[in-house]
Image: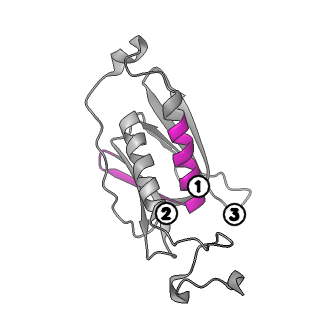
Amino acid sequence: MERPDIDWDDTDGFTNGTVGPTGRRVFFIQARRGGDVISLKLEKQQMAGLAEFLDRMLADLPPVSHPSLQVNAGPAPEILDFEAPDEPDWVIGSLGVTYQQSTDRLVLIAEELTRDEDLKPAQARFPLHREQVASFIESARVLLAAGRPPCDWCGAPLEPEAGGWCPCAN
């Protein structure tokens, strides 16, 4: 079943979060516009890569004091609290980010992961304020650091049920 594309002109709230216990967590990004809340599932590595990329991108943007950006000054965006969804709207296959200078927004573009090559994947376009992006980066780092500790020898995450033991220790 094809899903409708999401192409917002602005995003009221944006965040990330997880559902489930450590070692079995499911990662999400969540966006809100008016009464619509979209929850998209992604992999832990996708969230880590997105946070790292957005951090570098924020550092490369023109300063907010730049004359071309003063026209778009407005109220600070809402920082959305994560609400655990029952089910994701869909699973993210690929992510892209672009900068829209006319509105001073970073635009996150997510494309649905599909198994059927004949099915057109859904696409979501979320224009984000700098403050929303900075909050996303900070919360992503907290979520990623809260995961299972790595094995000292191989770096693989340790299973909580194994009491800190890794097969590579044999």
What kind of element bears circle 1? helix
* Residue 31 visible, this angle: no
Pick the residue in front: 159 or 153: 153
| Residue hosting label 2 | 27
From the viewer's side, name the closer residue of 119 and 63: 63
Between disc 3 and disc 1, whose residue precedes?
1
* Amino acid at circle 1: Gln
C-alpha distance separating marks 3 and 2: 20 Å
Residue in the image at 42% along x and 24% along y: 103
Q: Which residues are magenta?
A: 33-56
Question: How far is mark 2 from mark 1, CA to CA?
Answer: 9 Å
| Front tag of 3 and 2 | 2
Name the residue located 69 percent from the left edge and 63 percent from the top edge.
115
Q: Element at badge 3?
A: loop
Crowding at mark 1 (Cα within 10 Å: few <14, some 14-19, many 20+)? some
- In the image, what residue type sits under mark 3? Arg
For label 3, the residue is 115
Please give the label number shown on residue 33.
none
Residue 131 shows in the view? yes
The earlier-in-sequence mark between 2 and 1 is: 2
Question: Which residue bears the numbered disc 1?
Answer: 46
First reached walking from the N terminus: tag 3 or tag 2: 2
- Where is residue 46 drawn, in percent x and y? 58, 55
Assign the C terminus to one quadrant of the image. Answer: bottom right
Answer left or right for 94 relative to 14: right
Which amino acid, mark 2? Phe
Q: Nearer the viewer, residue 120 or 23?
A: 23
